[in-house]
Image (cartoon, rainbow, N blue to C red):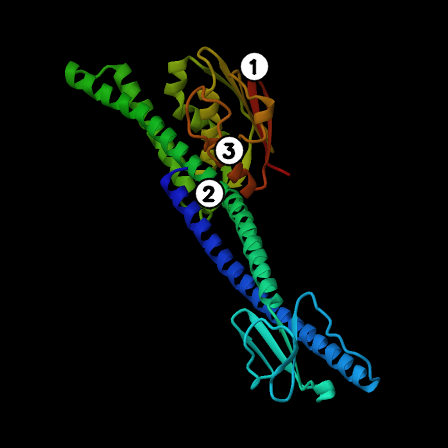
Amino acid sequence: MNKLTKRSFYSFLTLYLLSSFIFLTLASYWFYTAQKSTEMSSNFYKMNNVSDKVSSDIIYAHMMEKDFTLKLFPHAKVSLFDKNKKQIDGSFIQKIDFSKEYYMDGETFTLISQRATGHLGVQYVVVQSNECVGNVMKLKNKIIFTAIMVAIIIIIIAVLLSYMFLKPIKDKMQEIEEFVKDTTHELNTPLSALMMSTSRIKTKQVYDEKIIQNISISTKQLYDIYSSLTFLSFDTSKEKTEELAFDGVIENSIEYFNELLERKNISIEFDKNPCILNIAPTKAKMLINNLLSNAIKYSAPNKKIFIQTKENSFSIKDEGIGIEKDKLQTIFKRFSRANSYAGGFGVGLSIVDNIAKEYNYKIDIDSEVNKGTTVTLIFSV
């Protein structure tokens, strides 16, 4: 990842984790508070139930004139006091404050009940328990452990989501970087040729045909790159359509590429038939220029290119390197190249595809590796 992608990744990850952890903390605190309150209520009812049971046993023993034995309870200490607050039976955890009915001191809850109402001399039934604090501590540890596990899961999900959401950006940035690199390479070739030709002119102080041809080809290559970048970068949808003789546009394009054709010794057979289109002139020129440029670029020297126009269609066939079947579905994608045979930065066929979609033209491509490619545009669909 480059610096921009990394910065976006970490920004998204930080924002996602921060918001998730805030929500997790609030949810954990709310759950802990609710469960603590529930545990305290449950503890009160348990202690109250113990005091009721002891008071009931005291009253029953008194009424039936039976012996009373204070039972032991697993999670509570019970002690009995007379009206003078003197202990009669049982045991307690800590000193008792008889001014309160139910209170917490440290980790111990104390409940004081007077339901025995003096039977068997018992005025106060005191129940003390620290079970609630232990349960709350266990609950807190469980919540903390669960929150940590959820946080780990959130981090994993956040990283995966960050990669997933930023992958298109990463891919696009990679495409742009490749595009810039390829554009630099493409510009370097004609610029180097222009500089060498200019240097030769200065050295020789004469103008020979080869130097002029090199300058002309290099200038046209620069202009083609400029035209492609302009088409991609600016809105050309406002250009007005005209009724054009597309076969005439093709003738002009062949003449435009004539010097490059001569350099590679490539001949063109043009089966010319009238073909009238309603299309913006610039886009008509971009259609044929990109297709013819590709045909020349991917053809070896001493080959032929076949062009045919009909009333409702146009086809161009080369004897070049061809395109593999599995790459035919991706060649119209911007910045995509089927191979690196002759450079380029993968926008020519994308431009052709955009223009075809704008005017509802159908594109058919038939290609075989090492035998050539045929591109057909059907205008009436």
- Most extreme residue toward the right is 64
- In the rendered image, residue 149, in percent from the top left (x then y), is placed at 56, 50
Q: Circle 3 — which element?
A: helix
Q: Amino acid at mark 1?
A: Lys
Residue 54 to residue 354: above or below: below
Q: Amino acid at mark 3?
A: Phe
- Dividing the picture into quadrants, the one containing residue 3 is top left
Marks 1 and 3, how far apart at CA = 27 Å
> Which residue does the image show at 56% across and 53% down from the upper left?
145
> Which residue does the image show at 51% across and 60% down from the upper left?
25
Disc number lying in front (2 or 1): 2
Residue under numbered circle 2:
169
Position of 39 with respect to 179 (left or right) is right
Disc number lying in front (1 or 3): 1
Q: Circle 1 — which element?
A: loop
- In the rendered image, residue 76, in percent from the top left (x then y), is placed at 65, 69
Q: Residues within 10 Å of mark 1 (few under 14, many from 20)?
A: few
Residue under numbered circle 3:
246
Q: Circle 2 — which element?
A: helix
- In the rendered image, residue 100, in percent from the top left (x then y), is placed at 57, 84
- In the rendered image, residue 269, in percent from the top left (x then y), is placed at 51, 18
Residue under numbered circle 1:
371
Q: Amino acid at mark 2?
A: Ile
> Which residue does the image show at 38% across and 29% down from the upper left?
182
Q: Nearer the viewer, residue 78 or 161?
A: 78
